Image: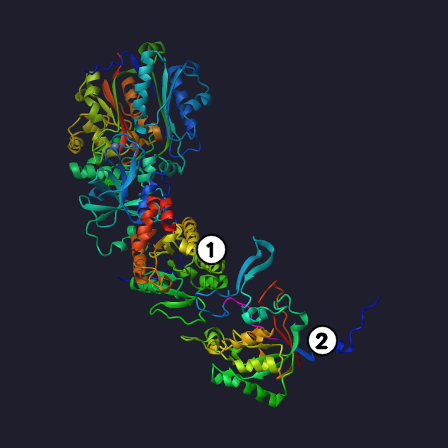
Amino acid sequence: MIPPKRKNPLLRTRAALQPPAARSRTALGITAAAARGGFALQVCAACQAVQYPPREICGTCLHDGLAWRAVPPEGTLIAATTIRVTADPYFRERTPWRTGMVAMDAGPAVIAHLPAGVAQGDRVRLAQKLDRAGQGAMVALPLAQPGDLLDDPMMREMTCDPKDRRVLVTDGRHAVGQDVARAMLAAGARVWLGVAETWRPFAAVEGAETIELDLTDADSVHRCAASHGGRLEIVVNTGLHTRPGGILERGDLTTARVEMEAAYFGPMRLAQAIGPALRARAADGTHPACAWVNVLSVYALANLPSWGAYSASQSAALSLSQALRADLRPIRVVNALIGPLDDEWHQAVPPPKLAPAALASAIVKALRDGVEEVAVGDVAQDILARFRDDPKILERELAS
Amino acid sequence: MTKPTRRGYDGIVVAAPTTIPYERYSIHGAQRWIGQALAAALKRAGLRPADLDGFCCSSFSLGLDTAIGLTQHFGISPRWLDHIPMGGASAIVALRRAARAVQAGDADIVACVAGDTNHPDSFRQQLTGFSRFSTDAVYPYGAGGPNMSFALLTDAYMRTYGATREDFGRICVSQRTNALSTPHALMKRPLTMAQYLAARPIADPVALFDCVMPCAGAEAFLVMRDDTARALNLPSARLLSTIERHNAFAADPIQLRGGWAVDRDELYGMAGVAPADIDLLETYDDYPVIVMMQFEDLGFCAKGEGPAFVRAHDLTARGDFPHNTSGGQLSVGQAGAAGGHLGLVEAIRQLTGETLGAKVADAKVAMASGFGMINYDRGLCSGAAILGVDG
Amino acid sequence: MSSPTPTSSLADFAADLVSGRITVIDLTQTLSADFPTIALPPEFGQCAPFRLEEISRYDARGPAWYWNNFSCGEHTGTHYDAPIHWVSGKDFPNNTVDTIPADKFIAPAVVIDCSRETAANHDFVLTRSVLEAWEAAHGPIPAGCWVLLRTDWSKRSGAAYANMKEDGAHTPGPDPEAVRFLVEERDVLGFGTETIGTDAGQAHHFTPPYPAHFYMHGKGRYGLQCLSNLDKLPATGAVIVSPPLKIQGGSGSPLRVLALVAS
Ligand SMILES: [Zn+2]
C-alpha cells in the first residue's frame, strides 16, 4: 500500500461536513448498536417479526412490544445504485456514492451503504456502523471481506483505521500508553508519545517520537497543541492515575485531586487546546482527523467503593467524554472501558487482570471497527453486562 | 358473506380543468399558486367564491397551513373540506372523496386544487423531513432523494424483466413530443433517443431525462352533478370508476408492482370497459419505470411485458396508445403535489375538448392514475379513475 | 509632626542601596510547571508541582486584565522550611510560617563552597571536617546566620537537576554530624541548599534519615531549598532576606530569596 500523497499546503482545508444527522428516537437503537459494534434490529415480542425501518408498533401484528435484538445480518443485495447527484453537501463531496437494497434473510428490506465490489445478487452481511454524524447506518459488506475493505472510501467514512494516520498517545510513562504506542506503530501509524516530568527517568518506545506533555500543566498542553495540534488524526488519552482507597479510608483529597487532574481536568485541557484543530481537520484529505480515544475504568459506570475516589474520577471522565462526543463531532470519541490492569496498583486484586498490550490491541480494533464504546477484558465486559442489566443492582453488588 | 357491489358514480362529472402555468422557481408561497388555480377554475365555471361549498387541497409547501387555513386566507366558507397529503395519488383520492360527497349531497360543487411553490432549496428541505422512515432509513444514505429510491426500483425492474434504458427512453421521448405543443411545458426542446441515452447520470441507472424537474405550479378541477354542469353551461366528463390502494404487496422485498394490480378488475368492471376501450392514458410519471409498471398493473400488458409493450406502441398523442398527452411531469415539470393532478386535469381536457396542446382524436374514454409517497423504499399510494365523455 | 529620624546606619543602608554600594542578588528559581519537585514513593502523598491557569487575558473572560490562578505545594520551587515541617520540630512554639518572628527573615549568611567537590561527586557529603576547614579559612561560623551550601547544582536543569537513578536521587547534602555541629555548636539560624531538599538525595540511608530536616527543625531552625546564584555570594558578609508567605499553620512556602552583598 502506498502511503497517502502529501497534501498541497496551499490548498484550503476542506470543512468537516457531516451527513444528515436527524433520526427519530427509536432509530437511535441502531446508533446504539453501532456504537457498541453490535447488530440489532427490533423484534416483535408477540409475533417475532423483525422490523425495519425502526418502528413503535409492529408492522405485522400491531403489537407495541418491540425490543432491540441481535438478528442474523445476512441477506441478498437485490438492487444497487451509484448516486452521482445529491442534495446534501456532505455526500456531494463524496460522490459517486453507492447504496443498495438488501433483502434480509430475517425479513426486512434495508437500504444500505455499499463498498466497491459488492454487486446485485451477492450474498451480503449487513453491519451497523457509525457515520461521520455519529449516527448508526446500515452497511452491506461482502461475506468474504477483502483485506483492503478499510481502504474503501465508504468504509473510511465509517471507521478510524490508524494506518497512515498520526497519533498522539498522551501518557508514555504508563505501560498502557507505551503499549498503545507500539500497537499504533504496528498498525501503520506515526506516533507521538507524551511524557510528563521529563526530569524523571522514563523509557522511550522505539519508533515513537517522545514529546514533553503533561496534561496537568496548561502550558505544556498548549506547547503540545502549538507544535502538534495541526497534524494529528487520532488522540489516545491513556491518562490513568490508578490508586486504591475508599473515601473514608483515604481521609483527604490530595490523591483524589491528582486523580481528577489525570482523568478529568487534564483531558479537558487537552481537548480545549487540541480539539478545535482536530475537529477542523475531520475532512482533511484521504486520512482526515478521525478519533479521540479515552481509556476509562469500567467503574465509571458504577462505583467500586474500595476504589471509591478513583471510580468517581472515572465517572467524571466518562461524562466528559460524552460532552466531547457532541463537541468534537465528526471526530469519533471512543471509550475503552477496562477492569483491573495487570499492574502494581492491582497487585492484590485477583485475576483476571488486563494486560496493557491486550488493551492496546483492543483500541486499534475499536478504531478499525468504528465503534465508540468497547469493554476490554473479562471484568469490564462482566461489569458492563451487569450495568446494562440493572445499574442499581450493580451498585449494590459492588458495594457488598 | 358476499362483498356488496360498489355503488357507481351516476350523475357525477368533472369539469373546469385548470392549470396555472409552471415556473421553475417562484418567490411566492404555495397559498398564492393554490389560490390562483381556485380562482381560475371558478372563473371558468362562472362561479363566485360564495358558490363553492366544497374544497379539497393538496400541497407539500404550505408550511403550517392546511385546507382549513386556506378557507380564511381565500375567504371561502365550504361545508365540506378535505386536505389530502398523498403526493402523486392526491388527485385520484380527492376525486373519489369529492365525488361521493357530491353524490351524497354533502356538497354541490367541490374544487379539487393542488399546488406548490418551489424555491432553490425547497427540494432538499422537503427531502430532509419527508417522512419518519425516510429520515431514519433513506435520506442518510447518500441523500439522493427519490432519484436514489427510483434508481433502486429501476435497477431491480431492469434485472428482473430485462428492460433496457432504451425502453424507458421510449416513454420519455414520446412524452417530450407531446409536450412540444403544451404551452406551459418547461421542456420545450425535442428530445431524441440518442440525447436520452447520452444524458448525464444521476443515480445509476437513472439519468437526467428520467427525472422530473421540480417547479412551482398549480392544477385544479371541479366535481359536481351533471345537472349543475349543465346549468353552468360547463363542458364536463363523466366519472365512471375509481380505485385506491395503500401499502399494497408489503411483503415484496422491492417494488416491482403497485396497488393497481390489486384493484384493476374492479376499476374496469365498475366502468364497464376493458383496457382496449381506453382511448388515452395519463399515468403518474415521476420516473419512467413507474409508467411501465402502470402499463402492466393497469392491465394493458402482462407483468414483465412493459418493455415489449413500449416497443410495440406509439405513445404520442397521435399514436396508437396515447399516453401522457400533455407531456406529463417528465416534460411539463413537477409542481409538487400538483404533479398528481396534471394527468387527471389533462384527461378531463381531452374529454371536454379543452386541450391546450395535442388532441387525441375521437377520445371517449380516458384513464388517469396516481402514485405517491415514497415513505421508505416504495410508493405507498396508488389510484386510478376512468372518465368518459359526457353525452 | 516630623517622622523619627532613622538611625544613621539604616540611613546609610538606604543610601548604599540607592547608590549601588549594596547589590541585591536574586537567589530564587523561577516558579514554573516543569521545575522538579521532591519525588516520594507513589503510595505517599505528593507535593503538588507548580501550576498556572489563566483567568483572563484581555479577552471575553476579562477584557482589560490579565491574571492567573496558581497552585502548588508549600515545598514547591525555591521554598522555605519551617520547623513544623518535620516531626522532630512539631512541638516548638512559633514553628509555623505565620508565627515565626519576622526578625528571623533577615539574617546574615555564610557560604560553604563545595562546587568543585560536587562536580566530581554527585553524592558529595558535607561533613564536620569540611566545615572546620572552612572555618580555618574564614573564621568561625557566627551564631544566628544562614549556612548556605554552594554546589552549583542550580546551574543544572531538568533531569540533570533531579538526577534520579534506579536507586533514587543523587544530590549532595550534609551528614548528621555536620548538621549537629552547625546547630548545637554554632547555633546557626538555618541551612540552605541549591538542591530540591536540604538533605542529600540518598539521605534516607543516614542515621537518622534526613539529618538536615531532623536536626535543624528538631532545634527550631529553618531551611531554604532550590536556591540559585550562590556562586555570586561572598563566603561571608551577605545578608539574606527570606520571608515566606504568611500561611496560617503553614509548614513552609515558596518565596523570593534575596541576598544583599557589598559591591
Ligand atoms: Zn408483531
Q: Residues within 10 Å of mark 1 (few under 14, many from 20)?
A: few
Instruction: Identify the subunit bearing mark 2.
Output: C
Please name the amino acid that badge 2 sits on: Val
- Residue ID at (25%, 14%): B8
Instruction: Identify the subunit bearing mark 1.
Output: A
- State the extent of the magenta-drawn residues as a range: C26-33
Q: Which residue was labeled with disc 1?
A: A248
| Residue A189 can be seen, yes or no | no
> Ligand 1: does it lie within 8 Å of the C-beta at label 2?
no
- Mark linked to residue C18: 2
- Report if residue A212 lies within the magenta region: no
Task: Give the quadrant of the N terminus of chain C.
Answer: bottom right
Residue B378 placed where, x, y %? 26, 34
Q: Nearer the viewer, residue A33 or B334?
A: A33
Tag 2 secondary structure: helix
Between tags 2 and 1, which lies in front?
A: 1
Q: Which of A291 and A375 is in front in this view?
A: A375
Rounded to the nearest angstrom, the CA distance separating label 2 from label 1 is 58 Å
Q: In this view, does B63 lie above or below A245?
A: above
- Residue ID at (35%, 31%): B336
In the rendered structure, the answer to whether residue C63 lies left or right of residue A256 reads right
- Residue ID at (56%, 70%): C30
